[in-house]
Image (cartoon, rainbow, N blue to C red):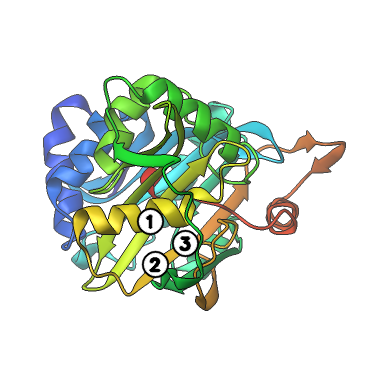
Amino acid sequence: MFEYRNLKPNELEAWYDFVSEQFTTTPRQYFANHFQNDPSSTLDGIFVALENNQILSTLRVFGREIYLSGKKIQTGGIGEVCTRTDARGQNLSSSLLDCAIEYMNSNNLTISTLRTGIFDFYRRKGWETTDLAMNISDVNFSNCEFPANKYKIRPVNWENDIPKLIEIHSKVASKLDGVFVRQNPEYWKQWTKTEAGGFPILVLNMSDEPVAYLFAKIDGASELKVLEFCALPTKEFLFDFAVKELLDEIQFPAATIRLFTWIPTRLAIKETYIEKCNMVRLNKPFEINGSMISNSNQLSALINSNSGFHFFNTDDY
């Protein structure tokens, strides 16, 4: 007989062990960070399936807000879904999703998002895929123009820079469907600082005022993966400058860069592809810009019509 319930406080350490044992390539500290560094974390959002007091399956609901058509929408992100190998095939994850849906409805989480490659499983519970166009660019700056002696970079100072980071992020994120609202300084101090990759940098003008920032990490032997790039209006052109200065600083011989298609660049585009790993579910109908969104298909269509679901990997859950 299986038991489905929320995680109890004295089970948290065992839960870290469990999820790290299922996600064998992900260190235990990753899951601990996700709970400890999340100002909105609650045990009420962690669901487990047990037998004889042993965890067999789990998932977590991350309480978030996202931008959608410029509005802030209460959202439940589904993550850390896993089942012990010898307990699979018994609908444990499916039953836990039912618990999560009930929880989201009770807590007025209007929509739900998740990231996966198992589309059919989640479609059966009401999630639908969305599109996100991505570019892979060659690292060749011969066609780029750089502003001489007008801008510079430095590492992010997490004690002093957060108000400016919030300002810059909000101006960009509010125009992109799917990006998490990130106006809580504690979220920046804890989650963002930990997840911002190895090279969080600010771009400054010559008055030392931040005008853009770049979070990136090395992916494999020759790729620089952009986690996020945001700039004040009219400063979006600084992406190429930020990447070149960063690569010079860390002396990394990147051959390719992976970035969102909306980021302006004069780097040669090697490949454009569509990511479909972001899925959405409508929990409660709502009206936006005069239109009623009544089901998940309408929600997905709205997002895709607005250039797709944009997800900053710094917020990955």
| Residue at image point 28% right, 59% down | 247
Q: Nearer the viewer, residue 274 or 80?
A: 274
| Amino acid under disc 1 | Val
| Amino acid under disc 2 | Ile
Q: Picture coordinates of residue 83 (x, y %)?
A: 27, 58
Callout 1–callout 2 Cβ contact below 8 Å: yes
Q: CA distance from mark 1 to mark 3?
A: 11 Å
Q: Is residue 195 left or right of residue 228?
A: left
Q: Picture coordinates of residue 210 (x, y %)?
A: 43, 30
Callout 1–callout 3 Cβ contact below 8 Å: no
| Residue at image point 56% right, 47% down | 236
Q: CA distance from mark 1 to mark 2?
A: 9 Å
Say which label, 1 or 2, has the lower sequence index: 1
Q: Residues within 10 Å of mark 2 (few under 14, many from 20)?
A: many
Q: CA distance from mark 2 to mark 3?
A: 6 Å
Does residue 128 lie above or below 32 as drawn? below
Q: Is residue 265 left or right of residue 201?
A: right
Q: Residues within 10 Å of mark 1 (few under 14, many from 20)?
A: many
Q: Quickly name the residue at label 1.
A: 243
Does residue 3 lie above or below 8 as drawn? below
Callout 2–callout 3 Cβ contact below 8 Å: yes
Q: Secondary structure at mark 1?
A: helix
Q: Residues within 10 Å of mark 3 (few under 14, many from 20)?
A: many
Say which label, 1 or 3, has the lower sequence index: 1
Q: Picture coordinates of residue 35 (x, y %)?
A: 26, 34
Q: Quickly name the residue at label 3.
A: 259
Q: Secondary structure at mark 3?
A: strand
Q: Quickly name the residue at label 2.
A: 257
Q: Nearer the viewer, mark 1 or mark 2?
A: 1
| Amino acid under disc 3 | Leu
